[in-house]
Image (cartoon, rainbow, N blue to C red):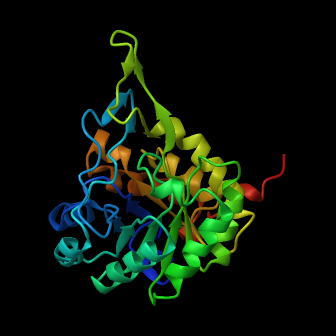
Amino acid sequence: MADLSVDICGLSLKNPTMLASGVLDETGKTMASIARAGAGAVVTKSIGREPRQGHGSPCIVELGDSLVNAMGLPNPGIDVFGRELEEAKKAGVPIIGSVFGGGEAEIAEMARLMADAGADAIELNLSCPHAKGFGAEVGSTPERVESICRAARSGLDIPMFAKLTPNTSSIVDLAKAAERGGADAIVAINTLKGMVISPEARMPVLANRFGGLSGPSIRPIGVRCVYEIRGAVKIPIIGVGGIESGNDALEYIMAGASSVQIGTAVWKHGPEVFSKVCEDISEFMNRNGFDRIFEMVGVAHEVKH
């Protein structure tokens, strides 16, 4: 039988799937329910120092199987969120705390506060494309990524992941910078900046005008980014973007990801998507003679056309 367990920077996961930040992860109860549904780990909502309302409505547009969202990083603030972490940790899977801030000092403080609240690892949101002054606006150059990672790393004794933006001329340069700054793993990718216009209304649909595209439409971009990053860094990669099936996850794994995150597919298929993806992966491994996930990581680099 195939063994789906993986180790990511010392975190033991029963399978290679994680809940991506931003979906059913603002309360301890919903995070625990995702863990019970089969996720190997859960990433929290991106949390800031103070409560934040986010953008007004409409903030989500459906595009077939994909979404364009401009939530604007709404969250209750770290002081309140600690109680949710306590509840989530009862589910028995690693809880990765996603944090954001407006610069090095604030992000470093948030990383420390999230660790103090009980997170098993930290994910630095350096890539949200629709919140002014945060996310991609502070994580779009190698210099900023390196300095932010270095500042956050200095106050932590738990794993730290850097979630990078694809809205850049070279995500590889960002990944190298994150590694130099002390990141223990790379998370790739976040959403792509986009917009939707209503011809009838003659105006953008989203209240914020711009949002982040997620879902199956971005998977080829995410797979390409992971493939390129794999050849440039030595630290693990966590693949994100458009994963709905075991085959989708295997694309990322064979491109170089040690694990994957699932977000938009939870909206479409429900929490059961985690167990279905794992079932698909297990069946593939049994058919093709793979015993452990790590045997498949990066194998697409070994094939020469």
Against 289, residue 166 (above or below) is above
Residue 184 in view (yes/no): no
- Taking the spot 32% from the left edge, 65% from the top edge, the residue there is 47
- Taking the spot 44% from the left edge, 69% from the top edge, the residue there is 123
Residue 26 horizontal/vertical position (percent):
23, 60
Residue at the top extreme, as displayed: 200
- Taking the spot 34% from the left edge, 9% from the top edge, the residue there is 200
Viewer-side residue, 268 vs 120? 120
Asked if residue 305 lies left or right of residue 241, the reply is right
Residue 159 horizontal/vertical position (percent):
48, 81
Asked if residue 102 lies left or right of residue 265, the reply is right
Question: In terms of image quadrants, where is residue 113?
Answer: bottom left
Asked if residue 256 lies left or right of residue 261, the reply is right
Residue 145 horizontal/vertical position (percent):
60, 67
- Taking the spot 68% from the left edge, 77% from the top edge, the residue there is 180
Question: In terms of image quadrants, where is residue 78?
Answer: bottom left
Against 222, residue 210 (above or below) is above
Residue 76 in view (yes/no): yes
Residue 262 horizontal/vertical position (percent):
40, 53
Q: Quadrant of the C terminus?
A: top right
Against 140, residue 268 (above or below) is above
